[in-house]
Image (cartoon, helix red, strand yellow):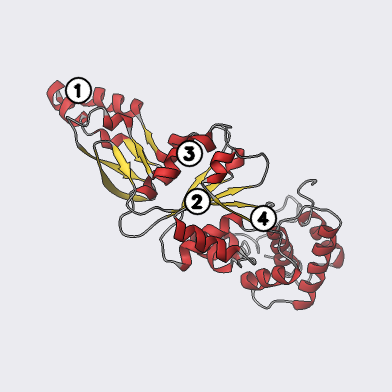
Amino acid sequence: MSEATWQVYRGTGEVDEKAVGRLPSPPPWRQFEELGRTRATTFRAPEGVVQVVNAALYLRRPLLITGDPGTGKSSLAYAVAHELALGRVLTWNINSRSTLFDGLYQYDAIARLRQANFERTAAGRDAAERKSEDIGRFIKLGSLGTAFMATDRPRVVLIDEIDKSDIDLPNDLLHVLENGEFEIAELARDADRMPEVQVTVTGDEKRVTIRNGQVRCQIFPFIAITSNGERDLPPAFLRRCLRVDIAPPKKDELRAIVQAHLGMADTDKLEALLSEFDDRRSKGSLLATDQLLNAFFLVTRGSLMTDKERELLENILLRELGTR
């Protein structure tokens, strides 16, 4: 990498031999082998959030977390899992095609049929019928289903952006969230012939045993459900949740977040950037905390970065996300 500039890519079309294989180190929040731990240890709980989380833990109720993008809604789940040593967070990312079964379990009927046909051809009908009885190879518990199978300590489940779901999903979740149980229909209908079946789970290579096609939690998980408030959720769903709204962090809170990620770096540049960020936000711009982190990380990278370059980067990285 050339020592005369902070830039790695310079748009000349020529190979810079000094830059070959020498990409700069990523920021801490983009080091994926430590991503979950970084999100957990750098999260700073706003006022009132700790009390609501503890209430959800005591009452065994899901926590519905609302707030603007980038306020730390998802990070709260990682922070709870880390502080209570509850293991890896089980994540269910919601989109408009998500259904209840995506979170509970998936049954790959096509793969089972193909495997049975292959075994029948290779080993004969009797052997194929015996092997194809292992239906559990084709069933995998989703994030929520896996959490319900926990036996020694509760798992943390992050249901991310519930407001992006199909209109029916919140109502479909009601029975599961209220009763902590669900049925795997493909196993229940053959329970008299196969009362115990081992299935795979999310995030682990081991298999767990399902009896009579029923999954009933022994320990209710900590369920964190996030929403950006893009649509209203049904009252019946809201009744089963404890709700907390995470407000955009104030200037002092932003300073603490940046320092948690990057330490006591260039305080003059940090204060200048905090003032710029706060000023834009006070004028109505919708900005996320990670935009501030990105901007501060970059503008403090190279001593040879010009003032014009810094201003250009600030305008790019602090670009408004939308209108209120």
Residue 269 lies, in percent from the top left, at 79, 73
- Amino acid beneath label 3: Leu
Using the image as rendered, state which of residue 316 and residue 36 is in the foreground.
36
SS class, disc 1: helix
* Residue 98 visible within the image: no
SS at badge 2: loop
Q: Helix or strand or loop: what does disc 3 sit on?
A: loop
Q: Mark 4 against mark 3, which lies toward the viewer?
A: 3
Mark closer to the observer (4, 2): 2
Residue behind mark 2: 62
Is label 1 or label 2 in front? 2
Q: Nearer the viewer, mark 1 or mark 3?
A: 3
Label 4 crowding class (10 Å Cα cut-off): few <14, some 14-19, many 20+?
some
* Lower sequence index among marks 3 and 2: 2
Q: Rate crowding at label 3 as few (under 14), some (14 to 19) or many (20 or more) other CA atoms within 10 Å.
A: some
Quadrant in which residue 130 is drawn: top left
- Give the percent coordinates (x, y) of residue 7: 73, 61
The first of marks 1 and 4 along the sequence is 4
The percent coordinates of residue 5 (x first, y second) are 76, 66
Residue 13 image offset from top left, x and y in percent:
73, 50
Task: Compare marks 1 and 3 and give the one earlier in the sequence.
Answer: 1
Q: Is residue 136 above or below residue 113?
A: below
